[in-house]
Image: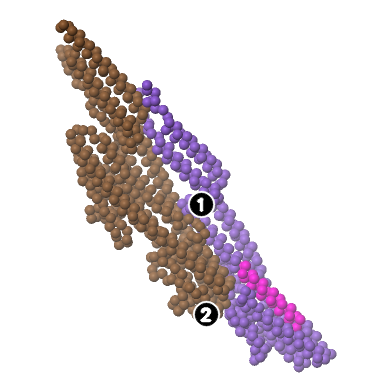
Amino acid sequence: MSSIRINPNPMPDLLASLEELQQRQNTASLELATGSRINQPSDDPAGAAELAQIHAANSQADSFERSIGSINGLLSAADSTLGSVVTAMQRALSLGVEGANGTLSDSDRAAIVNELSGIQAQLVSLANTSYQGNFVFSGTAQTQPFVLDPTAPSGVRYAGNAGTNQVAIGIGYNLQVNLPGSQVFNGAGSDVFQSIHDLITALQNNSGIPAAVTAVGNASNYVTVQRVFYGNGLNRTGSQQTYLNSTKVQLAQQENAVSAADIAAVATQFTADQTAASAAMASLGRISQAPTLFDYLK
Amino acid sequence: MSSLFGMLSIATGALQAEQGALDTTANNVSNANTPGYSRLRPVLAESDPFVVGGVTYGTGVTLQKIESLRDPILQLRILEETQQQGQLNAFVSAAQQAQVQFIPSSSDIGAEILNFFSSLSQLSADPTSIPVRQGVLTAAGNLANAFHNVATNLVQQQSNLNLTVSQDVQQVNTLTIQIAKLNTQISEMQGVNQDASALVDKRDVLIGQLSRLIDVSEIKSDNGITLTTSNGTALVVGQQSFALSTQTTGSGQLDIYSQGTDITTRLTSGELTGLVQSRDQMIPGLLNRLDTLAYSLATSLNAANTQGYDLNGHLGGVANGGQDLFVAPPAQQGAALNMAVGTTDPALLAASSDGSPGSNGNVANLLAVQNQPVASGQTPTEYYSTIVSGIGNDVSNGSAELSSAQSILNQLQDQRNSISAVSLNEEAAFMMQYQTAYDAAARVVTTINDMLKTVINMGG
């Protein structure tokens, strides 16, 4: 009789496979706990690199969203300020039309001038609006943009600068977020402060009132045109926000595709490994108690 | 014709032989769990017959020798695989330890890069705010710390590996001294024709331990065995052992020397090779790539910072009398380890492009670094993710090789055990067999004794 002699000591082999099963169960329970099959770079090196890219894109989208949040505040503040400016100008315009009526007495015109002076002060204050501690219409300067100056033709001098800021709200997508006050309020031939100043002078002198009224109307229209810039800005941030939202949804789907653990499969495998491990342990226990021929020798 | 006394000597010979055989069983059973033990087997042979008057008479049995069952070729294969496994094991555990630094988290280098640029984009929306400026500096500090911590841990790991190298070298020396001693004892015993298998087993165990540490080639010679590394460096020649030593090199690492020759890079397998590979290639590779990234980020951001104006309307950067965003790294090497923020006053961050404080024009230049290539056309984030996947690949490839080496080694051990390991069932069967034969021989002695009595009484 001759047969291949088998390894009489299967213990080390069983222990090795038991260890491997244990290792696999550890990995599986980590995957089940995190829901991700990439818990360290070696789990899927290429996938880990891809994940890093996805996280970077996601973080960038978050940054853009935060930027949009802050510039929306600035744009809205400027937009509503200019809305108030236009309303004030409209009031000045109707006061001017009223003042142009030849039947008015001097004291009537004085009353109108009085109200116009109030509007003038209100406009200066509106032009000096600040948002979160920064002047909205000062360009990139930090100084109060419009100061009263009797030596200036309109009585108001621009002390800001012509600088503008751009903020990135997408990759390669920079949005200009401000117009310098000089552009908004001091349009050539449509200067807000000049037109009000001139209207007051015309009413006081009771001459050239219709021309001054026309100038106020022009200035008001000019501001309305400037206001469109801020409305457009808000539109753009709105649509960019929608785009970023959908980008983030896509990124989340991508991340899921790259790293999500197949929970059902992992759980099934986990159970199978557990069964195999208990079987291996049972057989280890049996082997250590298994009788040998020695037990039968009397 | 044979004599009664002749028969008696045949029977007593049988008693001796069976007793010797039983002795191997006893020894095998005792050593059933001794690591490296090779089971013994008695070699019984017929004694030379003699011829009287044309009749050939047998002269019984002799216990020729007790042989130990081992397969030298298999033993060599096991040594090779043990070396391979030792190397992979050392490398994989080092790579796994290094990988811990690169496990994605909210404060790893990759996340801190993103946090930093994200803080810059907030600055873009609100360039005059001191809290936002402080936020940028804090994020820059976290980024510098992340680089510093990872580099520090890698350097620390490198010096731990160094320590293990010197411990391994000492262990190699202890083992080679013991093996040389055993060589002496074995050749002395064999010189007087004694069975040295117990010592050979011991030597095999020691060579197995040695091969886990260093690559060993075994050559059998008259006076024992010669052990060399695969490139021919002598470790044990017969009864003499050759100690290895370590010496610190210019790079601050311990190199391995044998009789004045640096053999560090000539070792091809074994734990020492895995350690040296991790210490001199894997970790320096990681550090080098981190340095490239840190250097590029620090210098590009500093350069962008120098182009703009701070809150006071001064040009930014040390070159213009201000502060650099990061302490300017003097060289690429060490840039990650020494990365630190250079700006202490948030007002000195150069966000403005026209000199007025409310301008954010230069933030765009700082932000542009995020999409500028660091090296090989990759942006900082892409470059970092390549580092991460690189170490991930090292671990996953190494682990795969390790597990296949491990299963080959298991199979070889299986084969070795199927030849050399003690089976208790087998021993029980042999024991019964030898005992029965011993009983029978004893019975023959009794019978001859009776016959002799008969012969003696004939005279009476």
Furthest toward the right, the residue is A103
The three-letter code of the residue at mark 1 reads Ile
Q: Colour of chain A?
A: purple
Pinpoint the chain carrying mark 2. B
Badge 1: few (under 14), some or many (20 or more) residues near its Cα, within 10 Å? many
Q: CA distance from mark 1 to mark 2?
A: 48 Å
**Which quarter of the picture shows residue B71?**
top left
Q: Which residue is mark 1?
A: A38
- Bounds of the magenta segment: A68-92
Task: State whether the magenta stretch is mostly helix, strand or loop.
Answer: helix
The three-letter code of the residue at mark 2 reads Asn
Closest to the observer: B277 or B361? B277
**Which quarter of the picture shows residue A13?**
top left
Q: Which chain is brown?
A: B
Closest to the observer: B428 or B333? B428
Q: Which residue is mark 2?
A: B312
- Marks counted in the figure total 2
Is residue B249 toward the left or the right of residue A27 in the image?
left
Pinpoint the chain carrying mark 1. A
The percent position of residue A216, horizontal first and vertical second, equals: 73, 84
| Quadrant placement of the C terminus of chain B | top left
The percent position of residue A234, horizontal first and vertical second, equals: 66, 70
Closest to the observer: A56 or B23? B23
The percent position of residue A40, horizontal first and vertical second, equals: 48, 53
State yes or no: residue A49 in magenta: no
The percent position of residue A145, horizontal first and vertical second, equals: 62, 82
Label 2 residue SS:
loop
Which-is-in-front pick, marks 1 and 2? 2
